[in-house]
Image (spheres, rainbow, N blue to C red):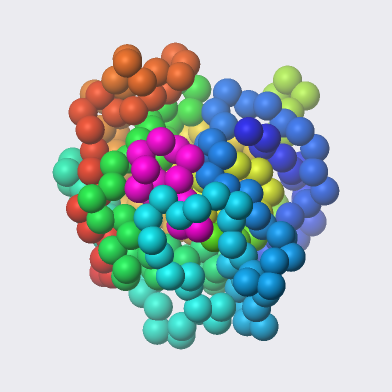
Amino acid sequence: MDVRGPIRTIGPVIRTRLASVLLVLPLLLATACGSGGGSGDATGKSSGRCSYPDSSAPAAKKAKKPPSDPPAGDPTTVTISTSAGDIRVTLEPDQAPCAVNSLVSLADQGYFDGTRCHRVTTQGAFVLQCGDPSGTGRGGPGYTFADELVDNDPRLQPCGVEGGQQYCTYNVGTVAMANAGPDTNGSQFFLVYGNSKFPPNYTVLGHMDAAGVKVVTGIAAKGIDPATASGPGDGAPAEPVTITTVKAG
């Protein structure tokens, strides 16, 4: 999987995607969950604010596409109830309207109910990854949507260069979309329980409260299942974690 996109340092404005360059960092946050952003397929065209074109891969679980115009009354908080405890997330629709719109729509449809958080990382980067009903890291809702990235994002400071590679800091509590490259967002998201350096290519859609961070930290503290390890400190949680519901409030 490619991770692409240099940092731009002009004003905090929302952008869709920067000119691409290949970056390789220790954690690549999503495997192939179906390309399709910018496919040009007629089914992906929309006159609204957001566009959700079909992905090349079938849906891991049947889901309707979100409305192209995010409803004005969408909630600004959701609670991710899991077998390990509740994780309350404050959403940021002003910064990522299409990502929030998609998450809320999928939650309302029960898309995440009964799904496992399939990945936790405990070395170099510190995240719990969820949102794939297939539990493989390759599943999505059958559609994609564009990145909503913020130039010089104050939420992702400090930024810098390490080993010739540009990074920003996804700080404790950040909730962001996983992807398989530019504009390939789907249903997978990751929860940051320890400051982690990544290319600034992942759409931030909210942040956890302190109690939620504690839940995720507790999951990670139990380690990974060695049978699923894809590298040091990278695999499925040693104690399986299942999302029971994602609900507003």
Q: Quadrant of the C terminus?
A: bottom left
**Is 45 situated left or right of 189 in this image?**
right
Prevailing SS of the magenta stretch: loop
Residue shown at 41% from the left, 50% from the top: 60
**Residue range of the region highlighted in magenta in the rendering:** 130-142
**Is 171 situated left or right of 156 in this image?**
left
The percent coordinates of residue 174 (x first, y second) are 45, 48
**Looking at the image, which residue sits at the far right?**
19
**Is 200 situated left or right of 172 in this image?**
right
Q: Give the answer, above or below, for where 94 lies relative to 151.
A: below
Q: Give the answer, above or below, for where 214 lies relative to 245.
A: above
Residue shown at 71% from the left, 60% from the top: 39
Residue closest to the eye, 42 or 234: 42
Residue closest to the eye, 84 or 150: 84
**Count of all numbered marks drawn on residues in the image:** 0
Decide if residue 124 is in sight here: yes
Decide if residue 189 is in sight here: no
The percent coordinates of residue 129 (x first, y second) are 40, 40
**Is 111 situated left or right of 6 in this image?**
left
- In which image quadrant can residue 46 be found? bottom right
